[in-house]
Amino acid sequence: MGLKKKNRGRKQLLVVLVIILLFVIGLGLSKLTKNVDTISSNEIAVISVKGIISFSGSTIPFQGSGANAQGILDNIEKAKNRNVKAVVFEIDSPGGTVVASKEIANAILNLDKPTVAVIREIGASGAYWVAAATDKIVADELSITGSIGVISSYLEFYEFLNENGVDYNRLVAGKYKDLGSPLKDLTNEERNILQKKLDIVHDSFLNFVKERRALDAKEVERVKTGEFFLGIEAIELGLIDYSGNKEFAISLARNLSNSEGAKITEIKEKKSLFELFSKFGSEVFYHMGRGIGTEISNIEIKEDPRLIV
């Protein structure tokens, strides 16, 4: 009788844990879907740019998502609300795809209110492209910035395939249709074509930074190599304006917009159910699932001693 009561208690605990889990998901949903359109007082909006910037986002289940470009663009559109007096872009990203980074930067330029970027640990490459679109850039002295370059490197394994009896039967309509395929050697002609395209993108990126940051010829020569710079170096090169943290960036935004009494609102895109599971799966699901799994395991073992190993 005592054993049955004990198992019944464990099953009740299992039910309670499941209820708590559902409650946490609902709570997360309510927090992650805040819409700035409902604001009726002066606000400083904060928009996050975290992870690899792209329109596709992360495709790895339960590993969180990158910086979804469309979501960021939607958030910028929300920030056009007349009650938002300034926007702070909280950046922690190594970069991303060219078009996604460029579109976000252009959207920031179209905001008719002061904008400030704060680079936390890293704001490099495409993420710096985004930061350069703001009026002022803040970064920690030891954060990673810059990396004003373009990369399109890839692995070739055609020799490995040949050595193992795997042949690449090339069938294309158009001489350069399989340009850059890892299944064949890259000719000098093809390499030159790819390099020219990379140079075009690099020039566009560099010219944008040069204009936005008012860099002189010497500074342009220094930063165009694609090298990344620590925050303390970036100040000397003119890539950022201030050394500081998120709180400093918010204070700066208040000053630029003459709205000292403005509240802080973090604008976040609405999350799908799958994205919510991804967010909570990394932490909540692990810990709570581990507890549930332990309870189920204990019930089975206690009720049938033959399962003991």
Image (cartoon, helix red, strand yellow):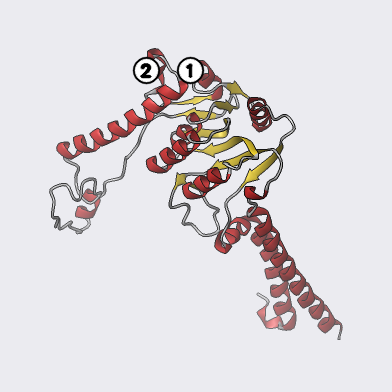
Depicted 179 relative to depicted 259: above or below: below
Callout 2 environment at 10 Å: few (<14), some (14 to 19), or many (20+)? few
Q: Secondary structure at mark 1?
A: helix
Residue type, mark 2 in image: Glu
Depicted 26 relative to depicted 115: above or below: below
Q: Which residue is mark 2?
A: 221
> Residue 308: x percent and y percent?
68, 77
Q: Which residue is mark 1?
A: 237
> Residue 129: x percent and y percent?
45, 33
Which corner quadrant holds the N terminus? bottom right
Q: Earlier in the sequence, mark 1 or mark 2?
A: 2
Q: Is residue 293 in view?
A: yes
Task: Name which quarter of the figure residue 294 lies in.
Answer: bottom right
> Residue 158: x percent and y percent?
22, 50
Taking the image as shown, residue 202 lies to the left or right of residue 66, namely left
Judge by depth and name the residue closer to the eye, 281 or 24.
24
Judge by depth and name the residue closer to the eye, 297 or 51.
51
Q: Residue at 43% x, 29% y: name it.
A: 147
> Residue 133: x percent and y percent?
48, 31
Tag count:
2
Which corner quadrant holds the C terminus? bottom right
Q: Residue at 66% x, 31% y: name it.
A: 250
Q: Residue at 46% x, 40% y: name it.
A: 104
Taking the image as shown, residue 154 lies to the left or right of residue 103, namely left
Residue at the extreme right of the image, as rendered: 2
Q: Secondary structure at mark 2?
A: helix
